[in-house]
Amino acid sequence: MPDFTHSPPLIRRGRAILAAMILLLPGALAAQQAQIIGAAEIVENRVSGEVAGIKRELAPEAEVYRNELIRTEAASSTRLRFADRSDLRLGPAAQIRLDSAIYTGQAGTAVTLSRGALRFVSGSGPVGTYQIRTPVATIGLRGTTVDVVLRQGRAFVTLVDGAAQVCVGNRCSQLTNRCDYVEAGGGQVRPAQRLTPNIPTFNTACRGAACGGGGCTASAAGAPGSPGPAAASPGGYDPAGGSTSGAGGAAGGSGGGGSTGGKN
């Protein structure tokens, strides 16, 4: 084998680059073989992804993968769309993992939000199969648009449409009224309440094209303590706790908005 110890600097540098490429090859192949689940529709400022140990900057129309870790930096946001028509928007300084059997139309679809804020619109997967996991609570969805904000060790979950259940261990609170929110943290979950101006929301955490409009504000919620209009229930969802069509899931359980009950 030739001895390149005393090769010119350009040759030595070329060999170092080639060695680095070889070391990266297994991870690159793994990334190529990862399951594509959707794409980044809008990217504002710096948003990164990491899958199979490979890090990259996301650009509009970039594909995203199952088990990918997505991070937004300060003053950054993104909107992701998935194969089952789910819609996920991330605010600034957020981190989420696209895990489980996500966006394949199978049971157990989940994302894990570890910091920041998101808005999630569930897609065409079986009713009751969508879940959002956070360090302090698990949110089960039934044909739902929901906002989640993590702030100082607490999760603030606001219902925009459909129905949801927020659980800490076996303690759960139901969300069935539009613009009601649930606060969870410290091992506790509070009953659903009307949104008030001091409650963190996705609308206040995220602004710009990727964030979109709509959602809930304190003015849209009405007077504190008064029941709001029931959110539109998806086909097959029984607010009393049953499911008349589709698969049951994590959001199941008894009770209406503002009540607590056991987790199924």
Image (tube, grey):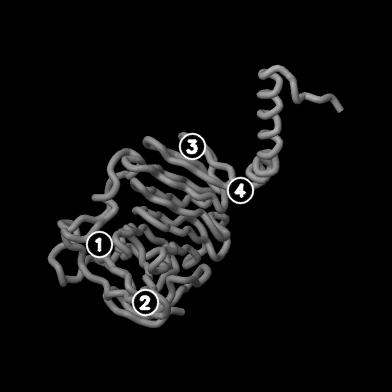
Secondary structure, mark 1, is loop
The mark found on residue 172 in the picture is: 2
Query: Badge 1 is on which residue?
Result: 179
- Residue at left offset 42%, top offset 50%: 88
Q: CA distance from mark 1 to mark 2?
A: 18 Å
Secondary structure, mark 3, is strand
- Residue at left offset 39%, top offset 74%: 168
The residue lying toward the viewer, choosing from 31 and 197, is 31
Whether residue 156 sits left or right of residue 246 in the image: it is left
**Mark 1 closeness class: few <14, some 14–19, many ≥20 residues within 10 Å:** many
Secondary structure, mark 2, is strand
The residue lying toward the viewer, choosing from 191 and 48, is 48
Discs 3, 4 touching: Cβ within 8 Å: no
Discs 3, 1 touching: Cβ within 8 Å: no
Query: Badge 3 is on which residue?
Result: 57
Q: CA distance from mark 3 to mark 4?
A: 15 Å
Q: In the rendering, at what x and y percent does residue 79 appear? A: 41, 44
Q: CA distance from mark 4 to mark 2?
A: 35 Å
Question: Looking at the picture, does residue 242 appear above or below residue 51?
Answer: below
The mark found on residue 52 in the picture is: 4
Q: CA distance from mark 2 to mark 3?
A: 38 Å
Give the amino acid type for the residue marked by disc 1 in the picture.
Answer: Cys
**Mark 3 closeness class: few <14, some 14–19, many ≥20 residues within 10 Å:** few
Is label 2 or label 3 in front? 3
- Looking at marks 4 and 2 on the same chain, the residue that comes earlier in the sequence is marked by 4
Discs 1, 2 touching: Cβ within 8 Å: no
Give the amino acid type for the residue marked by disc 3 in the picture.
Answer: Glu
Q: In the rendered view of the protein, which quadrant contains the N terminus?
A: top right
Q: In the rendering, at what x and y percent does residue 115 appear? A: 38, 55
